[in-house]
Image: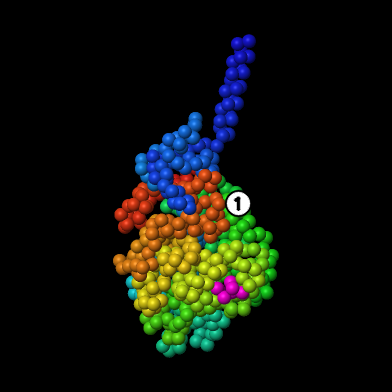
Amino acid sequence: MAYRIASLVAFFVSALATTMAQQPQTIVLHNGKVITADDSFRICQAIAVRGNRILAVGTNEEMLKKAGAGARRIDLRGRAVIAGLIDAHAHALSAGLSELRGPLPRIHSIADMQAYIREQAAKLGPGEWIFVPRTFPTRLAEHRMPTRADFDPVSPNNPVLYDASYTVVVNGYALKQAGITRDTRPPATGEIGKDAKGEPNGILRGAASLLKAPSERSAYTEQEKLEGLAAIFKRYNEVGITTTTERAATLDDVRMFETFRKTARMNARLHVTIRFDATQPVEEVERQIQSLPWKPNSGDEWLKINTLKVTLDGGMTIGTAYQRQPYGPFARTLYGHENPEFRGLLNIPAEKLARIVLAAHRLGWQFTAHSVGGGAMDALLEAYEKANAVRPVAASRMLITHGNFPDQRSIRRCRELGVIMDAQPAWLYKDSPMLAKVFDDKVMSLFLPLKAWQEGGVLVAGGSDHMIGYDSFAANNPFNPFQAIWIAVTRKTEAGTVMHAEQRISREDALRLFTRNAAFALFEEKTRGSLEPGKLADLVVLSDDLLTCPEDRIRQIQAALTMVDGRIVHEKL
């Protein structure tokens, strides 16, 4: 009898333990400053999480009562808590691969490039391609675009390619291999740079397709790509990023992301943008859009496919962004422009762009285009207006990716159409001092104009355009969100200047760029972007108080704890 009683007790204890183990864990973070970023921007003392959802926010007493047996209690000791940060524009795959096989060299000058080329030439056999890691002439000590004359003396036996994004520079070996001569015709929307004698100088603007260079990404196995994603997600967690993006995915990339979703290593949520090659005939682009195996907003809370994209112009840092007026005289020095009337490159004619946008819009896709220059921004808005005449586009939350040079008319058009800006504050920090030598003050007064967008009723989502490098500050495009928030608040540049202080925004609004606003741009305002009951338990404990610390300490804030889906993925408390 005693044996049977003991057995029953053991059974019920075991059953109770199993039931308790199956219950989602409750975590209470108390004795802190919970910055909810809700509609009223409430500040609370504590927050309770159960499973993967926020249970409640409120006072210490209220939240500790909700803890219950087995709950974890974390004493914040006065630290601030914010919603998990969202990077609305990154390139997670290329970023993950960029240092997977070893650290990148720091390229700050043409002399650094030459040293790197010599080093690689000594390691590689003759004829092997040497790829110079990406940087921009705006960030080089010489403040000019390199040419083949810089590369030829240090690379007589290897083809060399310096990728400046939408513009590449190659040496004489690569030009000869591709058969590019003074008589070669560039692509319809490209340019072959020439020296004073009319010979190719190695600068290929929108003309890299003429080369016979292998794709760097194709050299990686799928397993390496998965390893790279895991590595970069870890680094995103370390700076408080809980949702990131892939703003230029191929169809094969999307399938690889789906494989990654099945692993247990996905410590940040991922939103995917599929990019199409718009140099194809418009009928082929339309067919590809119509035959996509995914529907708008396909996926789940971890992986979602919701945006289509094309590349409309080039880059401001390399002088190919399509502007409303010609580049200034300094562009000849900085970018190597030969034509004083050059406005940049517009890759897609208006009628073709309108058809592509409408094909996406008819199927319910959110759409965006890489549109850096003011002229490109105007062209995209015109296409959106044509689609809007068929069916309102506001519900699709169309984006302008970059849009660094708006004017008051384009701001008004964005508001009327409900178009969202996909902006990168770090570019103001890194590049605006050199751009101010290219463009007049009227143009620069509306360069990344966060205040003007806000006052004009245009929602802005914050991003980094991170694509190369593991260090959040030293990466090619820095991805540290606290530095980006600091830039939005101060308008300070790397050169120590302040660029149009009237465009500064408050700390609260700068935080919204990477929380509420970014969530809305990703159609996720009901699941993340603020600390409210029922939303996903994605949050960050800060090393300093974002709202009250000295202004220049904002950029030094660290993530003391990062939680994704109710699980702590980074902790330095």
For the C terminus, the quadrant is top left
Q: Position of residue 201 (x, y in %)?
A: 44, 82
Residue 147: quarter of image: bottom left
Which residue is drawn at the image coordinates 62% and 67% (left, top)?
392
| Helix, strand or loop under label 1 | loop
Query: Quick check: is 516 in the magenta stretch?
Result: no
Q: Position of residue 238 (x, y in %)?
A: 43, 50
Residue 359 visible: yes
**Of 410 and 240, the residue lying toward us:** 410
Residue 208 located left or right of residue 447: right
Residue that protrudes farthest toward the bottom in the picture = 197
Which residue is drawn at the image coordinates 58% and 29% (left, top)?
18
Q: Examine the rendered structure and indicate whether residue 244 appears above or below residue 68.
A: below
Badge 1 density bin: few <14, some 14–19, many ≥20, Cα 10 Å: few
Q: Three-letter amino acid code at disc 1?
A: Asp
Number of numbered discs = 1
Residue that protrudes farthest toward the front in the picture = 40
Circle 1 residue: 300
